[in-house]
Amino acid sequence: MKDTPLLKSGFAREWGESLISLIYPERCPVCDDVLSGTEKDEHICEECSAKIRFINSPRCFKCGCALPDDSEEYCRACKMRKHVYDRGLALFEYDTVRISMYRFKYSGREEYAKFYAKAAYEELGKEIAKWGPDGIVPVPMYAAKKRVRGYDQAESFATEFGELMGIPVYTDMVKRVRATAPMKTLSARERGANLKNAFIIGRDDVKLRQVLVVDDIYTTGSTIDAVAAVLKGAGVDKVWFLTLSEGRGI
Ligand SMILES: [Zn+2]
Ligand SMILES: [Zn+2]
C-alpha cells in the first residue's frame, strides 16, 4: 500500500491497514480463498503452498526453462535463436500459476505480488544476487492500459521483489510508447514486428550497468529482448530477466 499523508503516522497507518484488510481480506494467490492469520505471513494458504511447483534444474543456461536432463546446456529454442538479453530465470511451472496469473492480470488481484515476490526471493534470490544487478526494471505497460487496469502487474511484482532484495526498482527507466497487440495472438515473427519501436528509454539521469528486467511471463523472449535492446542501447552491459512463469506458445 502506498503511503498517503493521512496514513503517514504509525498508528494511523496501522488503523488504515486493518480497515482495508477488513474490507478486502488478503486472498490465497492460487485458490483465491481468504487467508487465515498464520497463512497471511506466507501470503498463501497451507493447502496450495504444498501443491505449488517451481521450475527445477537442470535449466537452459539462457532462458532458464527446464531441460529433460543435463546433457545439453541450452534448450532447442535458444540454440536456434540469438537473444539480446544475457540470461534469465522463470519461477513457477506454468500449470501451477496459470489461473493465479490470470487473476493477477485481469481481476484486480494486485496483492498476489507479495506472494510472488516472496517466493521469487526464497527460490531464486541467491542466484539473482550473484548476477549482481544494480537496478530492476519492470517491462512497462502502455500508460493508457495501466490507467484502465489501475496497476501494472509486472511493476507491482518488481517493486515487491526489489524491496526484498534491496535493489532499487526503476519503473520509469523504460517506457512503452505505443499500444501493442496481445502477444498470444501472434507468431514469433509477428511478435518481433509488433514490438518494433514499442519501447524507449524513459530517463537518462541514472546509469545502470547490470539490469534485471522483470515481467509476468516469458514465452519466446521477444518482449524481454526488445526491452534489453533499449537498455543496451543506453549503455547497460548485462541484462538479466526474472519472470513468474514461462510458457511456450502462449
Ligand atoms: Zn489456496
Ligand atoms: Zn533456452
Image (spheres, helix red, strand yellow):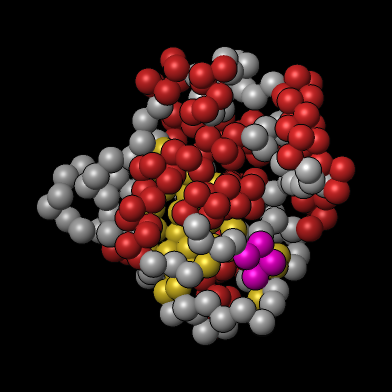
Report the side of 248 relative to 70 (left or right).
Answer: right
Is the magenta region chiefly helix, strand or loop?
loop
227 vs 219, nearest the viewer: 227
158 shown above or below 105: below
Report the side of 70 relative to 242 (left or right).
Answer: left
Residue at 55% from the left image edge and 52% from the top image edge: 163
| Quarter of the image with the N terminus in it | top right
Residue at 78% from the left image edge and 51% from the top image edge: 145
69 vs 103, nearest the viewer: 103
Marks counted in the figure total: 0
Where residue 12 appears, as percent x and y from the top left, is 80, 35
Q: Give the range drawn in magenta.
A: 170-174
Where residue 6 appears, as percent x and y from the top left, is 87, 43
Where residue 78 appears, as percent x and y from the top left, is 33, 61
Task: Assess whether residue 66 is covered by the magenta stretch.
Answer: no
Report the residue that reaches farthest toward the right.
Answer: 6
Report the residue that reaches farthest toward the left.
Answer: 71
Report the side of 182 relative to 187 (left or right).
Answer: right
Where residue 77 appears, as percent x and y from the top left, is 34, 57
Residue at 29% from the left image edge and 63% from the top image edge: 79
188 vs 223, nearest the viewer: 223
Residue at 37% from the left image edge and 20% from the top image edge: 50
The answer to whether residue 149 of the structure is visible from this angle is no
The answer to whether residue 203 of the structure is visible from this angle is yes
137 shown above or below 149: below
123 shown above or below 155: above
The quarter holding residue 122 reads top left
